[in-house]
Every structure is written in structure tokens, then in C-alpha cells.
Image (spheres, grey):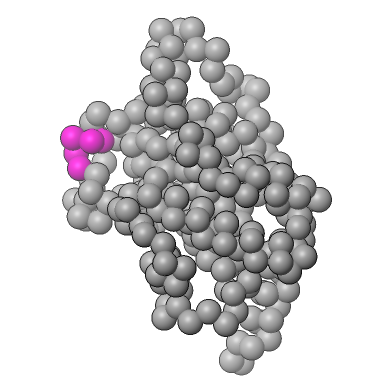
Amino acid sequence: MLEQIKDWIERLRAGSTGGPDREHLPTPKTAGDQRLSDCRLIVLDLETTGLNAAKDEVIAIGAVAIHKNAIGMGDQFDLILRRPELDISETVLIHGIGPEALTRGHETEDALLHLLEWMNGDLILAYHSAFDQKFLEKALKTTLGYTQPHTWIDVAEMLPAFFPDAKTGGRGLDNWADFFGLEVSARHHAAADALATAELTLAVINRAHKNDVVTLQGLNDKLKYYRRLKNMHRPG
């Protein structure tokens, strides 16, 4: 996938991409009666300069696609953006992305256009998705003027909804990875975190099928029911 992205960007700069047209980008899809076993799902993770979407910026994007209940190892997205002007002094020890990497990264506009083409409007899943959604929507609007709303699903909400009795010792990605015995190759690396989140998503989809939740709409209904139960048991 990385070589395809590099080749596309080189052709873009040469003026002969055949790549995505800003005016004809894929239309975001909505959650309906699509079967979980048939649809393609995008599992995404971002690295940023901080936690505040109002002032911090995206510096790396990692994503994998789930299709037919499997992770496509050749269907991935992994790019560091070219943002040498950003101050990463407070977060470099977390994500390991230093000034040199930001100098050699890919142009933000090119990367975001290719991301939109690669996602093809499919539903996006992320762990604590509100965080990634805010940052990605800001980057797309600021860089491309793109404001089409994509459908997002929070994996951090899906897991307790389908595994309510799991004793994880916490609500973080690491807690759930340990619970399922997953090995995360490099935490706080966007592509590695996206892969771990995708593996957790497959565990949810497998449990969903056993509970006769077989469509995206059924998944949404299950999450709505989970939220109602959670609110009912919240201290007044």
C-alpha cells in the first residue's frame, strides 16, 4: 500500500495522477442493512501533536480495512505527514515522530486526498473515535475544504457492549488487548494501534454474529441500547 501511495504522489507532482479529483471524491456511506460479513470497514488511528483538536495537529495516519470478517494486510494506509513547522517537543517521546520524520513526510494535501479515495466513503471505526473524528475533520476542512460527514463507530464503546462481563482492569486499548491476548507491536504508532483496534473489532463482530447482530443497523441498535443501559445505571 505504501508503494502505491508513493507512486500516486509522484504522479500527482508530475501532473499525471489519474488519482482522486477533489470534485468527485467518494460519497460517505451510512449504516443500514449492510451485512457485517460483507461490508468493508475502515479502522483508523491518528498521531497528533497533542490532545486539543482546537490547537494541535495531525502528524501521522494509520488505518487498515476489514472486509468479509478479515483484515486485509494489503489494504492498509500508513503515512507520516510533512509538517516541519510543528512543535512536537511535548509528544515526541510518546509517538517517536521527530523533526526529521516530519521534514521527510508526505504533503498533507496529497495524503488526505489519497486517504479519502482509499477509504471510499466506508464507515470509520476508531478507539475513542470522538478524538480521531475531531482531528481528521479539522484537517480535511482546513486543508481541502472538505466537510462531508462520515459515519464513525467507537470501538471503545462496542467492546463493553458485547463483552459486558469482561474483567479488563481498565477501559484502555492496552487493557482490552491484554484481555484478548493480543500483541501490539508498537503502541502509539498509528498503524500498529489501528491494527490492534481492528483485531479487537473482529472479536466484536464474531460475538455480534453469535448474538444475531448481523447488519450495521443492528450494530447501531445494540450500541444505542448499551448507552441507554449505561445512562440508567449512572449515579444521579
Does the segment drawn in magenta span residue 101? yes
Residue 82: horizontal and vertical position, in percent? 31, 32
Farthest residue toward the bottom?
Answer: 236
Is residue 39 visible in the rendered image? The answer is yes
Residue 106: horizontal and vertical position, in percent? 34, 28
**Which of the image's four quarters has the N terminus?**
top left
Does the segment drawn in magenta span residue 205? no
Residue 183: horizontal and vertical position, in percent? 36, 59
Quarter of the rendering containing residue 8: top left
User: Which is nearer the eye, 146 or 212?
Assistant: 212
Q: Residue at x 23, y 31 (%)?
A: 103
**Which of the image's four quarters has the C terminus?**
bottom right
Please determine whether, in this image, residue 97 is positioned above or below residue 93: above
Position of residue 105 in the picture relative to residue 225 (left or right): left
Position of residue 57 in the picture relative to residue 176 (left or right): left
Please determine whether, in this image, residue 173 is positioned above or below residue 103: below
Position of residue 89 in the picture relative to residue 199 (left or right): left
Is residue 54 visible in the rendered image? The answer is no
Q: Residue at x 41, y 81 (%)?
A: 169
- Please, what is the dominant secondary structure of the magenta stretch? helix
Q: What is the total number of numbered labels drawn onto the structure image?
A: 0
Position of residue 83 in the picture relative to residue 99 (left or right): right
Please determine whether, in this image, residue 65 is positioned above or below residue 227: above
Residues shaded magenta? 98-102
Q: Residue at x 58, y 19 (%)?
A: 21
Quarter of the rendering containing residue 29: top right
User: Which is nearer the eye, 57 or 166?
Assistant: 166
